[in-house]
Amino acid sequence: MKILMLNPPFFTKFSRSSRSPAISKGGCVYYPLWLGAATGWLEKKGHEVKLLDCPARGTTLDEVLASVNDWKPDLIAVDTVTASYTRDQDTLKALKQALPNSFLVMVGTHCSALPEETLLENKGHLDAICRGEYDFILEELAAALEKTHQPDLESIKGLSFLKGDEVVHAPSRDLITGAELDEFPFMAEVYKKHLHIPDYFYPSVLYPEVTIVTGRGCPFYCTFCILPQVMNGHKYRARSPEHVVAEMKWIKENMPDVKDIMVEDDTFTADRDRIRKVCQTIIEQKLDITWTCNARADVDYETLKLMKDAGCRLMCVGFESADQGVLNNIKKGTVVPKIRQFMKDAKKADIQVHGCFMMGNRGETKETIQKTVNMAIELDPDTVQFFPIMVYPGTEAFRYAEEQGHLTTKDWNHWLLGDGTHNSVISTPALSSDELVRECDKARIRFYSRPKFIFSKFVQMFTSPRDIPRLIKSGWIFSKYYVQELRATWKDLVTKKDASTGQKQPVSG
């Protein structure tokens, strides 16, 4: 069967696989992780599969239609997230008009969180949606479609569809196990076959890089994080250390231009025994590789040292806030003293840290924001990101905002600004949505304008030549946003000064 796995057209460099999908001000472009995994699985089952990543390549809808008209896939899986959903609806309509006999299914976080709404709003051009992990759902659906054009959809676990005007949900499907994940083809192999590796970029990761997933699910309960709440669950299901290291070895042997391997598990360090076994296996096999991972701020020094010995260069860590009350409200499961100790241990182990901070969570005020920015500067990670809270359907954070009347809109188009970067749709008595976005902008300027930071990057270019490509690329991409933010911050300062002295405020334009 011919199957098209489609990351549909939207903003160029938009990352649907991100936990907070948007255009990154640092230029980050994610691989289509879940489409890629399913592509490999379906190919293993004998299907002819194409993986098309439109945002990475800047592919237009007209180009997609020209491609499908030539190839005529039998089954098309269209990925969707909240921020791109409206545009994805347009893609669905165009595909159904071009290929009325093809079976169109939506996959991803938004349709998994809102299956009824998605089906009813797209009646006539959407045949079904997959709820949650969709690798095995698509396998079973493809097998059924090969037998008949009108299969018994209700027998396919995890599928939802319309029967007339009635939404029908087939029973839920069990999550894929760690042992089953070991049966999947290497994601890196799928990328090499279907994608253009230089298109993908993490500002903090050596360039070019390749991203792999060694386990699904997260055992923690952060209120804002959509993947465990909607897609992958709270049980961490991991591939065996041997299988993980085998993929790393494959990358080293078959993708010689790759300088870094990004391990994109929600929390690679969640299972301490397993991370140690992975590291020990790398060391035993004398595999000279560099890798990066997502981690929590609770890893002990001995484990960090072992990770460093095994080639770990950097960890992406969600600190989120310096205020313990805010951390408790979002169920982060950590305490500020442990965060500070973790950073000391990471520096002692000589592992760089990319720190992630989020503004606007429950209990946030201007005072707690300043507290967080101050701590970010005190911790002094190698790089940082400051995001306004992005709430998505299906998450506890979204439900709370809706119940409290903090959502400014439910028009999904407002989840992004006009340039595709993050917006905020949360306004509280303490902070408006515009203030949240501006506070994030100001925090970036404050962190990245420090002479200490700028000097450290110049030193890094001389002491670590392999960092030069990613420093130049991320610096160039970020600079245009940085200049805009500097101008906006200066305008705010002038406006406040004029207001305090009674002068007329400047007229823009």
Image: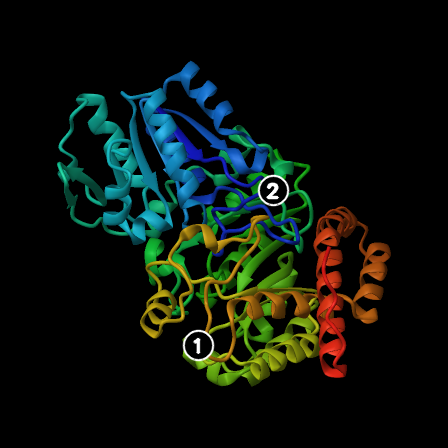
Position of 172 compared to 302: left or right? left
Residue 377, position in %: x, y? 70, 75
Mark 1 surroundings within 10 Å by alpha-carbon count, few (fewer than 14), some (14 through 19), many (20 or more): some
Q: Is residue 149 or residue 205 the one in the foreground? A: 149
Residue 141, position in %: x, y? 24, 33
Q: At 37% across and 41% down in the image, what residue appears? A: 183
Q: At 42% across and 20% down in the image, what residue appears? A: 68
Which quadrant does the C terminus fall into?
bottom right
Q: Is residue 52 or residue 89 the one in the foreground? A: 89
Amino acid type of the residue that numbered disc 1 sits on in the rendered structure: Arg
Question: Is residue 236 visible in the rendered structure shown here?
Answer: no
Question: Is residue 410 visible in the rendered structure shown here?
Answer: yes
Residue at the disc numbered 2: 200
Residue 383, position in %: x, y? 68, 63
Mark 2 surroundings within 10 Å by alpha-carbon count, few (fewer than 14), some (14 through 19), many (20 or more): many
* Image position of 185 with respect to 327: above or below: above
Closer to the eye: label 2 or 1? 1
Amino acid type of the residue that numbered disc 2 sits on in the rendered structure: Tyr
Helix, strand or loop status at disc 1: loop
Q: At 35% across and 58% down in the image, what residue appears? A: 393
Which quadrant does the N terminus fall into?
top left
Residue at the disc numbered 1: 362
Position of 49 compared to 356: left or right? left
